[in-house]
Image: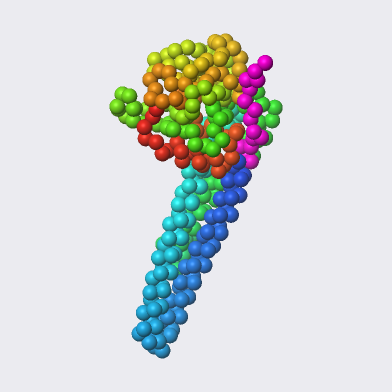
């Protein structure tokens, strides 16, 4: 008998993922800011020495040192830009986790949603950074210090929230199994997302329109997996989607799988997360072999990317996110 269940790799709990992100982000940011401050203070000390020795130095020596200082300043600016980019990327990852926390986890386990104003409380004010402005390149130092403080506080707040969720999740494995938490096709190298969620140019209609899911590019015949436990609600051909399957997972969750070459389930059939429900194809309004995948929550389409956490690491999630942002044209 054919085994139609996808064998998932050992998974990471959400709290483990966030702990990993928190640990790495804190360490990297703190080290980066430390070296940034050392570089700035070193530049200040060098400038001080130049002024002190000005009367005893020749014009040629001063010019050499001036050129060196310009090089140091340019290097400092480069390091600052790199640090800013890393902090922005960490902020994006954290924002995704915060969105999951607010819209998925706390809701599933009956916890009250945390208002945005509560999450951001205590982040205002500039007085604490005023002393830094007197340093050489003080604006850079103050801005970086403030950004790091905000990021660290958000991480600490999120860690506390996840600890609360973990405590509330005991004994609720069934509810958790109904959340679409894996990718619908095997995507080991995180390279199969051909188009992301949001406004995209339609390759057939030649207009910009809302793309309600993710497009996974894959050869015809590639297995498609149910992303959560549920009951098959609908199968067959539908305008635009071609051969499609819709699964009701309970708790307001539904998933849709489009452009399939083969359908291997029937309406009313119960399926488990990781079970094969069909194969990738090119049916319906499609420009190439791929799977169109959607998640609906209480009748509204939501970005499937925010739900992929059970079968990927934090680094893989970042890569998947970046891949989803590259294409401005959908495949359907």
Q: From the image, which quarter does the N terminus lie in?
A: top right
- Is residue 26 visible in the rendered structure shown here? yes
How many numbered circles are shown?
A: 0
Residue furthest to the left: 206
Q: Residue 293, how many percent across, how many down?
A: 48, 25
**Over which residues does the magenta segment extend?**
1-16
Left or right relative to 103: residue 12:
right
- Residue positioned 59% across, 42% down in the render: 18
Q: Residue 237, how many percent across, how many down?
A: 44, 12
Residue furthest to the right: 171
Q: Residue 220, how many percent across, how many down?
A: 49, 23
- Residue positioned 38% across, 81% down in the render: 62
- Residue positioned 69% across, 30% down in the render: 170
Q: Residue 162, how many percent across, how many down?
A: 61, 39
Above or below 58: residue 216: above
- Is residue 133 visible in the rendered structure shown here? no
């Amino acid at each position: 008998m054919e085994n139609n269940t996808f064998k998932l790799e050992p998974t990471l709990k959400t709290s483990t993922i966030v702990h990993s992100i928190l640990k790495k982000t804190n360490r990297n940011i703190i080290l980066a800011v430390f070296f940034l401050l050392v570089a700035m203070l070193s530049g200040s000390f060098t400038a001080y020495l130049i002024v002190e020795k000005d009367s005893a130095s020749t014009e040629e020596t001063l010019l050499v040192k001036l050129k060196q200082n310009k090089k140091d300043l340019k290097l400092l600016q480069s390091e600052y830009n790199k640090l800013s980019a890393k902090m922005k990327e960490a902020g994006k990852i954290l924002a995704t986790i915060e969105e999951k926390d607010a819209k998925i986890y706390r809701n599933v386990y009956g916890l009250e949603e945390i208002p945005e104003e509560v999450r951001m409380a205590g982040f205002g004010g500039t007085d604490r950074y005023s002393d830094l402005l007197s340093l050489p390149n003080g604006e850079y130092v103050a801005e970086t210090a403030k950004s790091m403080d905000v990021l660290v506080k958000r991480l600490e707040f999120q860690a506390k929230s996840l600890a609360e969720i973990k405590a509330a999740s005991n004994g609720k494995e069934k509810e958790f199994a109904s959340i679409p938490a894996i990718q619908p096709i095997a995507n080991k190298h995180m390279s199969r997302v051909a188009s992301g969620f949001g406004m995209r140019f339609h390759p057939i209609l030649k207009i910009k329109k809302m793309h309600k899911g993710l497009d996974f590019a894959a050869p015809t015949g590639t297995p498609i997996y149910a992303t959560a436990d549920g009951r098959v609600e609908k199968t067959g051909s539908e305008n635009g989607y071609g051969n499609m399957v819709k699964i009701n997972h309970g708790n307001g969750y539904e998933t849709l799988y489009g452009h399939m070459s083969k359908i291997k389930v029937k309406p009313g059939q119960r399926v488990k997360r990781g079970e094969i429900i069909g194969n990738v194809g090119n049916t319906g309004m499609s420009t190439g072999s791929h799977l169109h995948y959607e998640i609906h929550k209480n009748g509204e389409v939501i970005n499937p990317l925010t739900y992929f956490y059970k079968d990927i690491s934090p680094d893989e999630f970042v890569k998947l996110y970046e891949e989803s942002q590259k294409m401005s044209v959908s495949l359907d």
